[in-house]
Amino acid sequence: MYHHPVTRRRVTAPNTFGTKGDATRWLATVETDVRESTQELYEYQLCRHVLPVFAEVPVGRIDAAAIRTWHAELISSSGMSKTSVAKVYRLMPQILAATVDDRLLRENPCRVAGAATERSAQREIPELATVPAIHDSMDPRYAALVSLAAFVGLRRGECLGLTRAHRHRCVDGSGAQRRG
């Protein structure tokens, strides 16, 4: 398991590994893939949402008011979700931090309070009495996921990360894993 560098969410490996070396090699591969997809995302955000506004603006003219105006435009007219706006906004302080390091700006003008924070919508949790009905309405291939989530407390990623190899594992009364 590792924390995704962009989303900061925990990501579970597709299986357990025989050795620490195997796990380390898998993680190195995943991190390389993530860096490449992160770079693609940043390039898209830069080309689509940053450069159209700031490409012709001298760096010294990018101030807090310009950032607030740009951010307000992203929210009101871009058609993006609040989560996507937060992701695009997070790119700007990173870019402008380099201009501060290079002494092109005295301070980073990205100071819109809460703009970089992603707020996921609150999800409704069903009452336990409704779980059997949800279970019965599911495609049989996925119905066990409902029970795992509801009665065992596994999250979606944990449920989806389970494989047939996990079916023989269980936990004894002491909390230690055993195969059986």
Image (tube, rainbow, N blue to C red):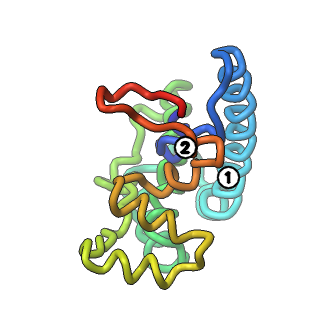
Look at label 2 and name its amino acid. Answer: Val
| C-alpha separation, residue under disc 1 versus residue under disc 2 | 10 Å
Q: Quadrant of residue 39?
A: top right
Q: Does label 1 or label 2 sit earlier along the sequence?
A: 2
* Residue 170 visible in rendering: yes
Mark 1 Cα shell of 10 Å, populated few (<14), some (14-19), many (≥20): some
In the rendering, at what x and y percent does residue 40 appear?
73, 49
Q: Nearer the viewer, residue 58 or 89?
A: 89
Please identify the quarter of the rendering in which residue 13 is found: top right
Q: Quadrant of the N terminus?
A: top right
Kindly identify the residue that appears in the image at 75 percent across and 41 percent down: 36
Of residue 165 and residue 72, the one placed in the foreground of this image is 165
Q: Quadrant of residue 35?
A: top right
- Give the residue drawn at x 46%, y 38%: 170
Residue of label 1: 41
Residue 89 screen position, x and y as percent:
48, 54
- Can you see residue 56? no
Q: Which residue is mark 2?
A: 6
Q: Secondary structure at mark 2?
A: loop
Q: Residue at x 54, y 47 (%)?
A: 91
Q: Judge by depth and name the residue closer to the eye, 179 or 106.
A: 179
Q: Mark 1 or mark 2, which is nearer to you?
A: 2
Amino acid marked by disc 1? Leu
**Residue 166 drawn at (x, y percent):** 58, 42
Q: Is residue 63 above or below residue 83?
A: above
In the image as oriented, which residue stretches furthest toward the front? 180
The image shows residue 120, relative to residue 163, as above or below, that is below
Labels 1 & 2 near each other (Cβ < 8 A): yes
Callout 1: SS: helix
Label 2, residues with CA under 10 Å away: few <14, some 14-19, many ≥20: few
Q: Nearer the viewer, residue 67 or 125?
A: 125
